[in-house]
Image (cartoon, rainbow, N blue to C red):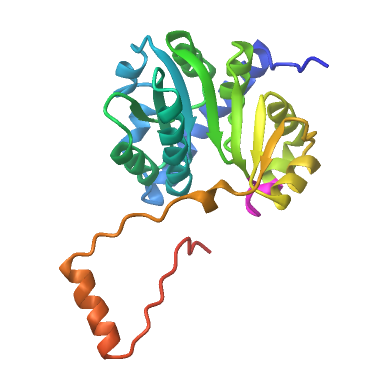
Amino acid sequence: MKKRIPGLSFRIVLDLAYVIALPFTLIFYVFKRKYHSGWLERLCLKRWAQVIQEDSPLVWIHAVSLGEARLAVSLYKQLKAKTSSYKYLLTSITSTGEGYLRNNVDNGDYVAYFPLDFSFVIRKIFSSLNLKSILIIETELWPNFIALAKSRNIPLGLINARISDKSYPRYKFCRYLVKNMLDMFSFVSLSGDIAEQRLKKLGYSGRRTIYKGSLKFSLSQPEIKEDARIQNFNAFLKQNNHKLFMAGSTHE
């Protein structure tokens, strides 16, 4: 059965909703001290001016933040080793993710902040680029982005798909829209059983699943620079019989 792609009226309503929400979003980021210069880039300015001049076949890999960016770089390097004739564009939303991408992507390829999901912004980018595929790490679903890619027959892949406990209620609230977006993907790689169960409850049929299992377990350990500070600290811990406890992702 042919999947329905949201039309002009849907995109107009969505754009209006984005316009209303944008000032509040910016205020939230400023008060949370998460504002960064990439917001200008998200309006398709700065580095995007160079990206949209690229004529070569392009693969776009999108990752939200640092954890997803590490997986995106691993995927990028493997794909580039097999398809070196393509150029690559890697995008992120956070400054930590963008910084990691910038430090690990070759000079001949591109890194930029992901554009805001306004239909006129996405349409401008898609009209300028020769996109061969779009790969989205985990579950970053932007309606205009996905619908316009589908309307241009650009293959879409969802890699290491997962839905967090925090995000799941929001996805259930707009279940019909999420189901339509999931149906537009050419293939899906699931991070595990929980992701599969949640996506199926949201209406995902499972027909496009090509792999199940978290790809993050295949990531290599980050390189550790054994400088004098680390060696001295390590000696201090051993001499005093101390343990070191480290924690990450400690948000409430």
In the rendered image, residue 60, in percent from the top left (x then y), is placed at 47, 25
Asked whether 71 or 163 is in front, the reply is 71
Asked whether 226 or 98 is in front, the reply is 226
Position of 215 compared to 223: left or right? right
In the rendered image, residue 221, in percent from the top left (x then y), is placed at 40, 56
In this view, which residue lies farthest toward the front? 82
Q: Quadrant of residue 200?
A: top right
The kind of secondary structure the magenta stretch mainly shows is: loop
* Residue sitting at x 44%, y 68%: 247
* Residue sitting at x 47%, y 8%: 127
Q: Is residue 48 visible?
A: yes
Q: Where is the N terminus found, in terms of image quarters?
A: top right
In reply to whether residue 226 is colored magenta, the answer given is: no
Asked whether 81 or 241 is in front, the reply is 81
100 over 38 or under it: above or below: below
In this view, which residue lies farthest toward the right? 1
In this view, which residue lies farthest toward the bottom? 240
In the rendered image, residue 86, in percent from the top left (x then y), is placed at 41, 19
In reply to whether residue 168 is colored magenta, the answer given is: yes
Magenta-drawn segment: 162-169
* Residue sitting at x 51%, y 50%: 218
- Number of numbered discs on residues: 0
* Residue sitting at x 53%, y 64%: 252
In the rendered image, residue 82, in percent from the top left (x then y), is placed at 45, 27
Position of 204 compared to 188: left or right? right
Q: Quadrant of residue 224?
A: bottom left
Q: Is residue 115 visible?
A: no
